[in-house]
Amino acid sequence: MGLQGYLALWCAVFGTVALVGYARSLAGVTAAQRAVRVLGRIEQVRKPRHGSSQRDGIPVVVSFQDPSSGEVFTVTNDRDHGERITAAWTGREIGVRYPRGRPHAYQFSTGDLGAGRRGLGWPNFALFLIYVGLVVFAAIDWSWPWALIGFGVPWTLSGVWYMPQNARAVRRRTDALSSQPPVPGHVIAVLTDTGTDSEGGTYTSHTPVIAFTTREGTTVTAYCTDQLPDPTNSHGRNITIHYDPDDPAVFTPDLASEDRSRALDITCGTVALLLGVAAVVAGATLL
């Protein structure tokens, strides 16, 4: 079988996967579409044990109602139940997703509860693999500069789409964090995890857990994964917290670092965009 035959087989296999996936989505029978999605409410927040692992998230008690039966369930996140809860307060709404008729198989979601609702992740990935196959074929059968064009065009388009949205999001975050005076906070625990890197060596990570009370009277417990100096020895430290009044899960102990992060993010985005443009120009020039 020649190169064209392998390409045809590649496209046929993943094209079938994509067509079946899109057909299932149009019929509304994907697992994501069949799942029940409701909003739960945090009823209780428990203090993480100092020295325990950060993999489990902040221990909470959540209640939610099954819309089909009307039954209210009160559950915890003491086992693997979807996304880790890294910021919690009493009354916070948490997304809950589970297979229809099986509320005990619940999964927590701290992001957009509607994300992935149509179940198009695998079909879209199959289309991406078809595109990769076509780019590789063009690079081998025609000339290698086609690889530069095939890489550069989608990279540039994604950069053009991503950069303005990201800049607006970063600006909104910075404005929200600086919209009012900070509040005092306290490091209530430091979580410790050990692991093995790709070379077989061991490493230890430390995650401070902070608690602060907003000016609106909400007591927040959250992981502080960066911007805190010497996290290993931070247990018991008093700190200052800037937070978003509309979403206390967005906070920082160092407002100045937000400006540095914003500048770095814009720089990296600009370099990435220029890299895509340069790839397209170089490929077109070398053809």
Image (cartoon, rainbow, N blue to C red):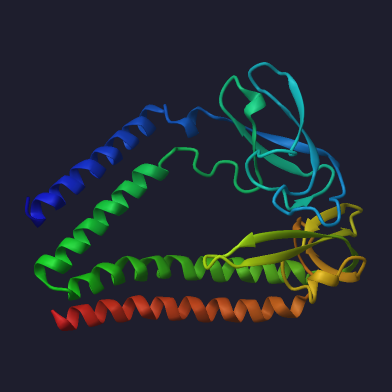
Badge count: 0
Residue that sits furthest to the front in the current view: 200
**Is 95 left or right of 284, judged from the image as shown?**
right
**Residue at 9% in and 54% down:** 4
Q: Position of residue 258 (x, y in %)?
A: 69, 75
Q: Quadrant of residue 46?
A: top right
Residue that sits furthest to the left in the current view: 2
**Is 153 left or right of 79, judged from the image as shown?**
left
**Residue at 18% in and 42% down:** 12
Q: In terms of depth relative to the viewer, which is nearer, 275 or 165?
A: 275
**Residue at 88% in and 66% down:** 235
Q: In terms of depth relative to the viewer, which is nearer, 229 or 265?
A: 229
Q: Quadrant of the C terminus?
A: bottom left
Residue 132 at least partly seen: yes
Residue 253 at least partly seen: no
Is residue 52 positioned above or below 95 on the image?
A: below
Q: Position of residue 253 (x, y in %)?
A: 80, 71
Q: Quadrant of residue 59?
A: top right
Q: Position of residue 283 (x, y in %)?
A: 21, 78
Q: In terms of depth relative to the viewer, which is nearer, 55 or 222?
A: 55
Q: Position of residue 198 (x, y in %)?
A: 52, 65
